[in-house]
């Protein structure tokens, strides 16, 4: 399993190919929309992520109990401190990602409880165990979905505004 959960807003590249050549002004306007949306997704995911006290403790080999929401080297405690907004080499693309290894287990849950209330978007290779497990506490996918329509609206507005010249 990957070391985090990545949510990408998909479709802008296809829309741009459909439009053909775009002006520098349009690209600049769309870049601002993409960056603002990534900031909003990160903020909403940070706000919705469960605090460390609600993330269950896990028993590891030897019977030692550790909290999966402990303070991390990523700045801040648990999941909230690990949510980052990354630039990419692809034009008009940003990635909002959680750099905490246990993030997918919190997002999608584990065991029978997780399987019973998993959010949409679960990776095909994500497997639930036979034990009771923990309930899913989605925060990334709801944040992405909350920002989907505003992104589409703002991108369309940016294209219309720059096309008017």
Image (cartoon, rainbow, N blue to C red):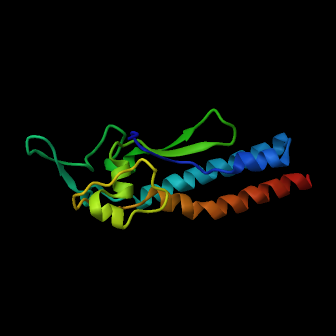
Residue at figure coordinates x 27%, y 57% from the top left: 55
The answer to which image quadrant residue 47 occupies is bottom left
Q: Quadrant of the N terminus?
A: top left
Give the left or right position of residue 2, taking residue 70 as reference.
right
Q: Residue at x 85, y 52 (%)?
A: 162
The residue sitting at the right extreme is: 165
Relative vertical location of residue 90 with respect to residue 109 in this rendering, above or below: above
Q: Please state the total of marks drawn on the protein image.
A: 0
Residue 76: x %, y % from top left? 34, 46
Relative side of 98 to 36, left or right = left
Q: Position of residue 71 (x, y in %)?
A: 27, 45
- Any part of residue 165 in sight: yes
State the residue at coordinates (23%, 57%).
56
Q: Is 81 left, or right, of 71 in this rendering?
A: right
Q: Where does the image place residue 59, in percent across and percent down from the top left?
A: 15, 48
Whole-percent x, y for residue 93 in the image: 64, 42
């Amino acid at each position: 399993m990957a070391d985090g959960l990545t949510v990408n807003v998909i479709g802008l590249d296809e829309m741009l190919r459909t439009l053909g050549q775009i002006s520098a002004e349009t690209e600049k306007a769309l870049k601002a929309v993409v960056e603002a949306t990534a900031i909003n997704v990160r903020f909403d995911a940070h706000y919705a992520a469960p605090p460390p006290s609600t993330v269950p403790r896990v028993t590891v080999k030897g019977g030692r109990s550790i909290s999966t929401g402990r303070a991390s080297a990523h700045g801040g405690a648990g999941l909230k401190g690990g949510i980052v907004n990354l630039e990419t080499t692809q034009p008009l693309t940003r990635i909002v990602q959680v750099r905490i290894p246990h993030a997918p287990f919190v997002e999608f849950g584990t065991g029978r409880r997780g399987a019973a209330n998993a959010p949409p978007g679960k990776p095909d290779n994500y497997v639930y165990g036979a034990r009771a497990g923990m309930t899913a506490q989605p925060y990334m996918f709801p944040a992405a979905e909350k920002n989907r329509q505003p992104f589409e609206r703002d991108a369309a507005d940016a294209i219309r505004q720059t096309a008017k010249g």
